[in-house]
Amino acid sequence: MTNVELYTQITLLPDELQKEVSDFVEFLNQKSKSAKSIKERQFGYAKGFFKMSPDFDDPLADFKDYM
């Protein structure tokens, strides 16, 4: 469908439906802008943000009965 055909179809709609089409077009524009604003994650961005205890890999005392 060409732009002219699309415009013709929209102009044939009643006013309230033309308003819905307009709202939907605004929604699609906002959606495309927000998709562009998502940035690619950088490796190592959270370095130093998390602290792990030195005994992190040690077995837990709570599970001693099951080992």
Image (cartoon, rainbow, N blue to C red):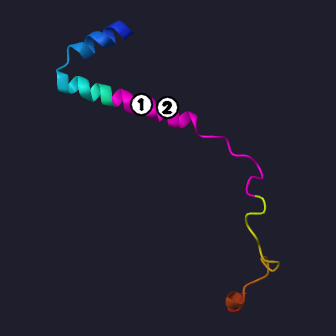
Quarter of the image where one finds residue 53:
bottom right
Q: Of residues 48 and 57, which is closer to you in this image?
A: 48
Q: Give the side of residue 3 with respect to residue 12, left or right.
A: right
Residue that label 1 marks:
28
Quarter of the image where one finds residue 36:
top right
Question: What is the three-letter code of the residue carrying label 1?
Answer: Leu
What span is in magenta? Answer: 24-46
The residue under the point 73% across, 63% down is 49
Indicate the position of residue 9 as horizontal and vertical percent values.
26, 13
The residue under the point 26% across, 16% down is 10
Image position of 48 with respect to 3: above or below: below
Indicate the position of residue 22 as horizontal and vertical percent values.
31, 25
Quarter of the image where one finds residue 25:
top left
Question: What is the three-letter code of the residue carrying label 2?
Answer: Ser
Q: Give the side of residue 1 with respect to residue 39, left or right.
A: left
* Residue density around tag 2, few if under 14, some if 14–19, many if 20 or more, within 10 Å: few
Indicate the position of residue 56 as horizontal and vertical percent values.
77, 77
Quadrant assignment for the C terminus = bottom right
Element class at badge 2: helix
Indicate the position of residue 63 as horizontal and vertical percent values.
68, 87
Residue that label 2 marks:
32
* Residue density around tag 1, few if under 14, some if 14–19, many if 20 or more, within 10 Å: few
